[in-house]
């Protein structure tokens, strides 16, 4: 089968790939905003703010990965339900 | 001093020609010794030579050793050596797994050790580049994540090595995307030696030759030796070439396949110990998603839900998904370049 004939079967997975990428870019834009937060002049607060920025960024990356995992799982579930045999009365 | 172009040509053609010459003899030898596996996706159930990944590993080791000899900078020699040791550790773990299957938990744990050469030699820059953000400084966190940089891609590539040519073609696409991305970020200057290209060409040379014998209908299987070696090489290239994010994006289908398996079997389960196979065969020998609720849902399972496909077409589906992820990886590289400049 030619490639162009197979591609339409993959719309959902291709859509998920694009969504994962776009959401990653959105996360990067958010991390960029977080990185722009002004540091404090005192050493203690500077450390707290710096650590907070890193933790917040990692929470965002964690959320992105969880969303990706959840959507893959959902895609699987939908597919499994579609595959169930039709009940007849 | 050998010019960069000569180094590139040598590091590509040595593993390529070596594998092309040795593989036919290897296949004959393995068949004579009855070290073969059944290709269960074909009606004739042909016997196919196992563990062809040994040749990939040997070709890559020899390619790396030759590169060490022809590169003049001692620091570059050491970096190539580190790459060589990393893939060798992963390859040996794969070899052990091929002979005596390791448990689904032990294998990824053992693969964590493959990153040790990179960590000990400090051949990494803890500044992964993100689009819009540019270089980030993650000293401690980066170090904590480093052990997974080889283990995760190695396992992800291993999980996608299920059909004739599927691992080889998708991995080659990822390697090509990494090469383009590296050029976009660091510049396409072929007169100066870029070690990322050396690693990519060594891997690509060995893999291209292997693909000739592994494509449909396969004459040899890679085994875990091959898939773990290639996955480890991709992981090592990501770290040594500062292309971590690009590699993650290029490997989206591999990660999705791993996510699918993990979520449907609720954890790490050895392929041979899964309660049911993800796919089954139709009467006309096409692949179909296994309707058994116990069957793990892999990328192949998702691709096949709209109806049965022959093995070649399933591999083509994987290629389509990888081509898209590679395009997205190249876009990521462009965005990183724009941000860093």
Image: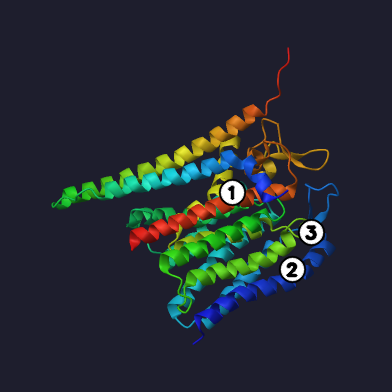
Mark number for residue B121?
none
Crowding near the residue tagged with mark 2, few <14, some 14–19, many ≥20 C-alpha atoms within 10 Å: many
Give the SS element for disc 2. helix
Crowding near the residue tagged with mark 1, few <14, some 14–19, many ≥20 C-alpha atoms within 10 Å: many
Answer with mark 2 or mark 1, whichever residue precedes in sequence.
2
Gap between marks 2 and 1 measured at Cα: 29 Å
Height in image: B20 above or below B127?
below
Q: Say which quadrant the C terminus of chain B sits in.
A: bottom left
Do we see residue B203 in this rendering?
yes
**Residue tagged 2:** B23
Task: Select label 2 or label 3 by which is in front.
Answer: 2
Q: Chain of mark 3?
A: B
Answer with mark 3 or mark 1, whichever residue precedes in sequence.
3
Task: Select label 2 or label 1 by which is in front.
Answer: 1
Please report the residue visible at 58 percent of the width from the left and 79 percent of the height from the top. B66
**Residue tagged 3:** B35
Q: Quarter-wise, where is residue B24 in the image?
A: bottom right
Mark number for residue B321?
1
């Amino acid at each position: 089968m030619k490639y162009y004939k197979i591609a339409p079967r993959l719309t959902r997975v291709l859509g998920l790939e694009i969504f994962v990428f776009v959401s990653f870019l959105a996360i990067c834009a958010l991390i960029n905003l977080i990185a722009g937060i002004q540091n404090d002049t005192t050493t203690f607060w500077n450390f707290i703010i710096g650590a907070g920025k890193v933790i917040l960024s990692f929470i965002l990356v964690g959320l992105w990965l969880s969303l990706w995992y959840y959507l893959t799982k959902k895609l699987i579930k939908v597919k499994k339900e579609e595959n169930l045999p039709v009940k007849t009365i | 001093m050998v010019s960069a172009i000569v180094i590139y040509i040598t590091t590509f053609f040595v593993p390529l020609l070596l594998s092309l010459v040795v593989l036919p003899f290897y296949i004959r030898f393995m068949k004579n010794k009855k070290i073969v596996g059944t290709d269960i996706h074909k009606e004739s159930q042909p016997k196919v030579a196992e563990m062809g990944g040994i040749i990939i590993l040997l070709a890559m080791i020899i390619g790396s050793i030759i590169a060490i000899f022809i590169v003049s900078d001692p620091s570059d020699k050491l970096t190539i050596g580190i790459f060589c040791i990393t893939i060798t550790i992963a390859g040996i773990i794969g070899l052990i797994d091929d002979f005596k299957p390791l448990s689904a938990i032990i294998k990824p744990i053992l693969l964590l050790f493959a990153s040790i050469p990179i960590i000990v030699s400090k051949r990494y820059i803890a500044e992964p580049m993100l689009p819009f953000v540019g270089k980030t400084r993650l000293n401690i966190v980066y170090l904590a994540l480093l052990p997974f940089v080889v283990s995760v891609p190695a396992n992800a590539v291993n999980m996608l090595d299920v059909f004739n040519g599927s691992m080889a073609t998708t991995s080659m696409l990822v390697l090509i995307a990494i090469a383009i991305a590296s050029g976009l970020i660091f510049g396409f200057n072929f007169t100066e030696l870029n070690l990322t290209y050396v690693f990519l060409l060594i891997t690509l040379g060995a893999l291209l030759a292997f693909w000739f014998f592994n494509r449909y209908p396969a004459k040899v299987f890679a085994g875990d030796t091959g898939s773990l070696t290639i996955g480890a090489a991709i992981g090592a290239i990501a770290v040594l070439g500062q292309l971590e994010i690009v590699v993650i994006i290029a490997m989206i289908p591999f990660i999705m396949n791993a996510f699918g398996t993990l979520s449907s079997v609720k954890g790490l389960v050895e392929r041979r110990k899964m309660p049911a196979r993800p796919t089954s065969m139709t009467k006309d020998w096409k692949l179909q998603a296994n309707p058994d609720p116990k069957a793990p849902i892999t990328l192949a399972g998702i691709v096949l839900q709209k109806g049965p496909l022959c093995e070649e077409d399933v591999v083509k589906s994987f290629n389509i998904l990888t081509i898209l992820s590679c395009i997205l990886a190249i876009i990521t590289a462009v965005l990183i370049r724009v941000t860093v400049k």
